[in-house]
Image (cartoon, coloured by chain):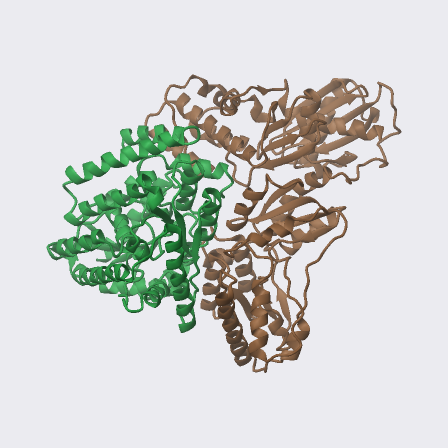
Amino acid sequence: MTEYFCKYVPVELLAGFEEESLLYNFSAENFDAADKIIHRNICSFSKALLEHRMEKCSGPIILTNCCDSIKRSGDILCGQVQKVFMLDLPHKDGPCARQLYKKELIRFIREFSEYSQKDFDCEKFKAACGKQLEEAKIPYILLMGARMSEELLAYIKSASLLPIVNRTCTGNRKIGPAPLVGDTDKLMDWYAKELLFQPPCMRMTDTAARKELINDPNICRIIYNTVSFCDYYLFEYSRIAKELPAPILKIETDYTVQSVAQLKNRLDAFFENLPTHKTNAGLPCTQAIRNDDKCYFAGIDSGSTSTNAVILDGEKRIVSFAALPTGISVAESAAKAFDIALKRAGISKEQINRTVSTGYGRAGIGFSDWDVTEITCHAKGAFFLNPGVRTVIDIGGQDSKIIRLDANGNVKDFAMNDKCAAGTGRFLEMMAQSLGITLEEISVCGLKWNEEIVISSMCSVFAQSEVVSLIAAGKKLPDIVHGLNVSVASRVITLGGRVGIEKEYMMTGGVAKNTGVVRAIKEKLGYSVLLPEEPEICGALGAALIAREENNT
Amino acid sequence: MSFIINKFGGVVGKSIQKKPQRSLQLLKAGYYVSGKQMKHLPNQKLLPHQRYAAVISNGAIRAPLERPENSAVVSVFMPCEMLHASDITPQFTEGLACYLNGAGCEQAFIHLAEDKGIPQTYCSYHKILLGAALSGVLPKPRFIANTTLACDANNNTFRTLSDFWGVPQFTLDVPDRETPDTVAYVAGQLSDLKSFIEEVMGKKLKDEDLKTIIRRENSSIQLYRRYFEELAKKNLPNNMTSEMYKIFMTHILFGTKAAKRYFELLLKDTQTAADSGKEIRIIWVHTLPFWQDSLKNIFNQSGKYHLLCCDMNFDSMIELDESRPYEAMAQKLLCNTMRGPGKRRTEKILETAKALHADGIVYFCHWGCKQTLGNAYPAKEQLDNAGIPILILDGDGCDTGNVNDGQMHTRLQAFLEILEARK
């Protein structure tokens, strides 16, 4: 079995040697082996590939020098005495580049023949050619961007009700049928052209033909995939994101199995807002539905820092709420918050018609009837509190989100911070710890600043050491805290730039209680920001509203 | 960084979005003043070739800002012989990024670039260039010319800039293998580049002018080789900034009168330098974090630690055959140690380390440079096996906000302590 990884690899040639081939495109459990042999800040796919090759595989692999990370991965595999065929892939596709690649193909045939001790059979090669792009004649979701792991692809296909068309860089391989006559030299002339004339990947010089990928009226949504430390596709994303008629979700994977699990939250939120999304209508309720004002609905938001519960009555009035720190057990914290909210409302569990859960722990709450992502719930809650809201800025414990709403309160688009904690509640917690003050103190301490200090480190770990240096340099506490507030505000507003933000703005999540950060965000926006009385419970409120809506469907 | 530069950078940075022309005028004025100061009131600790390099590099950055219509934005490995023969001034990514860092305003450009969707994981030099262009501060050049050597960022950055400015772009595709076919492939493109320049600039490039540049470049290489022979037995005071300026001379300014003069001065200063003694001799790999006080203070004009050379300054030292200029330039590109497998680069580092009697190698992993990062561990293994101590140092050549300064300083100092103990 010979492995390959890229669409420019001449995989059909292997058929000419009667050699089986496998597109290696899988996530890794971890990078324990890869981290020992390559720097960590290399494209994650390259690390997943090295992890696999070091752990499990000793057969040959065909690579192209398509990017810096793969080039160096190829070097490392050669150094590990693995059989690597590295093809020198031109960046251009003109006649001279085709001639050059043709010679590479002929070299490969010669070297593979020597390696495998087999002769190349032109007829078998020709029979293997003729791969066309998959198409959909009905509205579909287009996958674009960098390569997508088989695990993630499988999840997306299973979760979407619309057909998925994969045009990521491993999904748009296209080789026409081979000419019937011609010797190896002529065939390779044709084959080099076919390989180089595929829909171009972003490493090619001329990428104009990529416009055709999005030129189809049947595209109703786009999922744009990026891979951490692969910079190519973010350039395309930033160029096309605002031009596309179809809503687009940008995701990033680090090619680990865990990242697939983490992405499910964003993908679920994306699918929830599809026109064809199935709701929980018709699902069994905890009790028979009653439409009088004595029926109640509960929303539970199980976040990384706090767990919140809201109980609404049939008239959408908030009857009670509760907010607790999330303990070790998500389910126990949720049950506790729910009990407190019930007690405050003076009602029993049996009087709740339906319960919807949200937040990171939403799937682990056994007593809820349904779970919905916090993106949809925060949008729902914010719009309920003020129908003028068009942008929700939700800064929670472990992530920050910008959610764009349309005039009907539906989610138009959203962006979330990546894995780094900068711009989240956790970042502020870390900084408060370094400064030796409480979260309450850090909230107001920066309001009386004098000297403008710029916290230039965008990484939270580096920022922590920067803060320590500032303390050592004798800088005043209010000035440092103000610098931190501005740093968080900059992060969040930058995040907003990905989806475009518009007034009215509302802040939700725990950090909305931090006066200094709120003020810094207002200053960055140059506009006022609406603040709910209890910003932490907005997600739970949205969940309760959804529970009530579903009651009426 | 001094208080004045901080203030200056803050003022420049605040205007880049709303009043980019104001920022540009400030930068031009700032560079003009610093250029004058370097010329008339130079740092007396610097050697003549270092003072000269400071003035020439300043001029190389300023010229495209003053006369953008006569400039081209290029990548650092782009052969600039034809540009010089046509009197076009090149502006290159790393040089401009370092100068904007030197003006204390690189953070503003990095933030702007990231706001526009440029990845945080991207090379900082390229982020700063993109920020400078997309903000409207960097004026539109006449054209863009870039190679695919040595990194992926060239494809992204220069395509984005060409689209943004609406100026023609020429990409020189440099394969990873050196064969007669690849030499012909690159030579063909260089011949096309000549036609491209002629068409864009509306004037013919005279063969004789190109030959003059090539002759000067060959003379410079001869001087430079003699410098390396001398350096093997000398302790030449050096500093990170001067070593960074040397990249101007060995790349985009190669073939100019100014660069030739620089190599003459460099050789003379080396010949008159003190003989090598007990100093610790270091070869630096990749770009230099010249802005980082904690690191540069260790090397700057130090008699104890001798910063011998950065490997980018000996990546391709071959003379060109003026009767076959395109083939010769193609061969020079394909001989570059940055091309192809990482072990080629490491072998050249090892060869130079032996020739210069280096005590150790600092392998600098500049943020976002996957070519260099990816070769770090194999290079360590290769150099360890050869008995040359190596320190892999993660950092950033131009983004002051992207380093853990204390840790970097400790690691470098500890490495030098180990070398001292071995000596």
Q: Which chain is green?
A: B
Quarter of image, res B317: bottom left
Q: What residue do we see at 26% from left, 42% from top?
A: B58
Q: Residue at x 52, y 55 (%)?
A: A206
Give the answer, above or below, for where A322 lies relative to B316. above
In the drawing, does residue A66 fall left or right of residue A198? left
- The N terminus of chain B sits in image quarter: top left
Q: Residue B118, image x and y in percent?
A: 49, 42
Residue A224 at what x, y percent from top left? 61, 46
- The reply, left or right, for residue A521 in relation to residue B285 is right
Residue A458 showing in the rendered view = no
In the image, A375 versus B278, the foreground residue is: A375
Q: Is residue A174 left or right of residue A419?
A: right
A542 vs B205: above or below: above
- Count of marks, rendered view: 0
Q: Quadrant of the C terminus of chain B?
A: bottom left
Q: Quadrant of residue B210?
A: bottom left
- Nearer the observer, A130 or A516: A130
The answer to whether residue A118 is seen in the rendering is yes
- Residue B351 horizontal/vertical position (percent): 28, 65
Q: List x then y, in percent, for residue B161.
A: 45, 45
Colour chain A is painted in: brown
Vertically, is A22 above or below A446? below
